[in-house]
Image (tube, coloured by chain):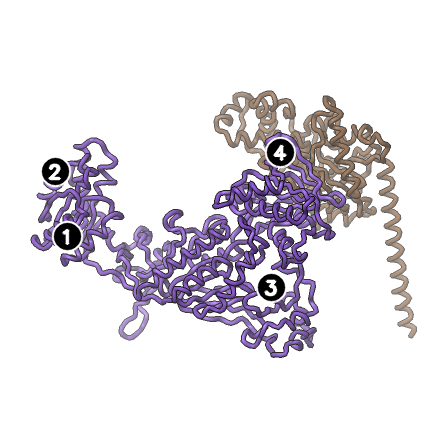
Chain colours: A purple, B brown
Amino acid sequence: MSRIGIFVCHCGENIARTVDVAAVAEALRDHPGVAWSEDYKYMCSDPGQSLVRKAIEEHELTGVVVAACSPHMHEKTFRRACAAAGLNPFMCEMANIREHCSWIHEDRDEATAKAIDIARTIVEKVKHNRPLESIRIPVTKRALVVGGGIAGIQAALDIADGGHEVVLVEKEASIGGHMSQLSETFPTLDCSQCILTPRMVEAYQHPNIKLHTWSEVESVDGYIGNFTVKVRKKARSVDEDLCNGCGDCQAACPAKKIPSEFEAGLGTRTAIYVPFPQAVPNIPVLDRQNCTLFKGRRKGLAKDACGKCKEACLRGAVDYDTEDTFVEEQVGAIVVATGYGLYSIGREQPEGLKGYGEYGYGEVPDVIDGLQFERLASASGPTAGAILRPSDGKEPKTVVFVHCVGSRDPEKGMSYCSKICCMYNAKHAMLYKHKVHDGRAVAFYMDVRAAGKGYDEFSRRAIEEDEAEYIRGRVSRIFREGDKVKVWGFDTLSGEQVVIDADMVVLATAMRPQAGAKELAQKLNVSYDEHGFINEAHPKLRPVETNTAGVFVAGACQAPRDIPDSVAMASATAAKVMSLFSADELEREPAVAVVNETTCIGCMSCEHVCPYGAVEVKEIRGRDGALQRTVASVNPGVCQGCGTCQAVCLSKSIELETFTDEQVYAEINALAAWD
Amino acid sequence: MSTVAAPDTGTAATAAAPRAPLAYYPGCSLHGTSREFDESLRAVLAALRVPITEIDDWSCCGASSGHATDHLLGVALPARNLALAEAQGFKSVLAPCAACYNRLSAARLAVAGDTELAERIPDVLGRPFANTVEVESVMDLLREAAVMIEEKVAAALTPNPLEGLRLAAYYGCLLVRPPEVAGYDDPEAPTSMDEVLAACGANPVDWNMKVECCGGAFSVSRTASVVRLGRAIIEDARRSGAEALVVACPLCHSNLDLRQKAIMARGEEPMPVLFITQVVGLALGLPAAALGLDRHFVDTEPFIRRLVEQAAVRAAAEEKVKAEAAAKAAARRGKAESA
């Protein structure tokens, strides 16, 4: 027989104003199974909690119902109080008569009646509660960071500085990401590489950071605290231990006309290459797609067509026969920082997006995108920082900047604002004017969105000090006429058509998630939005967590972000990872699904619906070791207690602890039985 | 009602599966100012074995003036023709005139998206209307037939006068816009006509005024504007190396052809303006008279004559090369045998 104690809280005036708390305590006193009932002004205060402890001891209570606020507010408080008095904490439940009753009703009698109903319902539930133990999970205090851009570098450094090992995986030959391509950064115009490269070197040399470049995440198994990650190290054709980065192989390579990804197609590279001189690690990779030797091998030539780089390498580091290798890493937490790619503007689009054929990108050589302009403006770029247009290498005297190309255009499949373009357009206009004093910079904009510290001042500076002409309106067509690039637009403030004979046009294209981000998200079992950006667990209160425990997200793979935002987010993930690593074991609430293996028919419907991948197939074997049948099994480390499996189970064999069918039916019965 | 029979001109390889019967809505232009569009369309579709049947008792689509006067009138006028096509058992209607296409398609869309309007229209029309008939543009139809056109051109007995001819595909506005009404092509950078021209063996030029305004219905009320706009179009086409303009809209045609004398007042060479169906017809080897090529204001006769002559010279040269190659091969064979 249950001996349940009822503790009704006034919450000052919060509950007592509309609910007759004494009447609630009185009504529950005679309820079957209730051994004690009282009310108090502030139940969560120390004297209030001691009332609970005292009553448990004096009346030998087997369960406690606190009729007060939401369980989110004080369930933990009262469960602790119960535990202190020797009662299993999971025998204590909250009856929410504040948010669900007193705050939302005015009529005192009706509110009191409802509060009594709520309390009785919870009493009936507690009668079916079972003593539970917290789940304890061991934690591997080692983190994986996917993506070696500024966000990934920051997260890795912060975690490593906190004393934990970090595995940093980067799919390119060097870490640094897009930030290494930028010339100068807004709103301070400090040199991007100057502030980034020391961080890259720091990450490379940090004793706690293990770097895998030219590598990708192949598969992920396990759960929070206990992930097993398989990393594919793509065949580099260069021995990372033997290579000393002298560059002789690059000098010897005869294939010199390959468009450089780092230079956004404006410069060239060799087939064996480091992407840029400050690359970290300074170890080349061999691009087998464009290598003369491998082209020959693909054609089936009996003799290798080249071999110059191997001949040139005095340390014997070049090896044409390396293959992809796999490394298995055990980690307790994962940070996703895969960054962004740019919308491709031209006619042909991947993923069902639409292009801007009318802007001539890819057809008119002097129509470029933002990253290409960064390379033109960069001192380390193909023009050594001189603004020279791609078609004929002349200095453009009129440059048009077009905002929102793809962004905020639902017709093209991207309804969102890319956030950084207003700022980098202002920066581009400034950089251009600083280098070409007699030049004319014209920007077509929809709105200028310059929210951020020093941001609006910066974009005003472009207009007021550097005399960039800002025209509010869209561009309808861009085409080549002679050696000019004709820009047709519309000024919506004056209501007039604008035609500009430009020398070069820079399109501020939408930010998209990095190619392959969706596949990675699927491997990690984290959700993403319709554009492929990774979803955060809560847009306001859990911005760097994902829906999978132990997987965190930083930077532009979650939404368009600038450098300060990405860095802040990365540090936030590091703080989350370190708090996860602060104990040897992870304690979790036992509100997880449990399978009744006797009745489970092994249909695995639960496995299909589980959003967290927590359900696995378990084999039931007889004494002779022969397989008898298979049933579902829930990994308590992965289960988040959402209850979806419970809803689909055909044989009623899977239940959520703390919300069993029995408990919920008891609550419903309680509501139906009394008026 | 007139029905164009489908003469069996196709080879076994090109005989495509028969299409569902297609209703034909000519509209006023194709019966009047643009008779050559109607003639060339009928000739080409017959050659492509696409049977069309003119909608019995069709009436005005209300273009330009109808929808500018009143929304209901603007929907009801084209809806009447759709209702007729529906009653006559058609699943889709071909509207070659860009303005007719736009009005018919817009009415179909308006009724589909407005249940109140859908209930009201049958009362207004005095006849049932279930909005089941699809509206097809001539560009959409020809693009679908592009493979067949290419095969027929390759199989033709006479040399193709269009081989390598540089043509500017001019779409104008209503053929591809607004995107929700004419969804078969990119509204800002369309390619359907270029694809059809390429299928004809011609060389569609890359130019800039593909979708710019020709002046539309202002030919009479604001002639100076139409002349200014037409000049920009023709000059850009010429700069891009085009020898003729290709259109699929009677209004575009009249603005560029009828007004060309005024447009080219500075004594430039006139530029022929052809309907896409005329171009396809020429490629298929149909006689110029059957395509109404004599009905234009810019005389196309010298242009066509030059094309045919050049094609003949090209063909003769090819024949000669072939004959020489054959002779050489024969000589080699002879030598080998005697040796």
Mark 4 nearby-residue class (10 Å; few <14, some 14–19, many ≥20): some
Real-space Cα distance between discs 1 and 3? 66 Å
Q: Please give left or right for residue B79 compared with residue B325 in the image.
A: left
Q: Chain of mark 4?
A: A
Q: Which residue is mark 3?
A: A275
Identified at 67% across, 42% down, the residue is A440
Q: Which residue is mark 2?
A: A23
Q: Do the numbered discs 3 and 4 sit on residues whose CB atoms are within 8 Å?
A: no
Mark earlier in primary sequence (3, 4):
3
Mark 2 nearby-residue class (10 Å; few <14, some 14–19, many ≥20): some
Q: Chain of mark 1?
A: A
Real-space Cα distance between discs 4 and 2? 70 Å
Amino acid residing under circle 3: Pro
- Name the mark nearer the viewer: 4 or 2: 4
Amino acid residing under circle 2: Ala
- Name the mark nearer the viewer: 3 or 2: 3
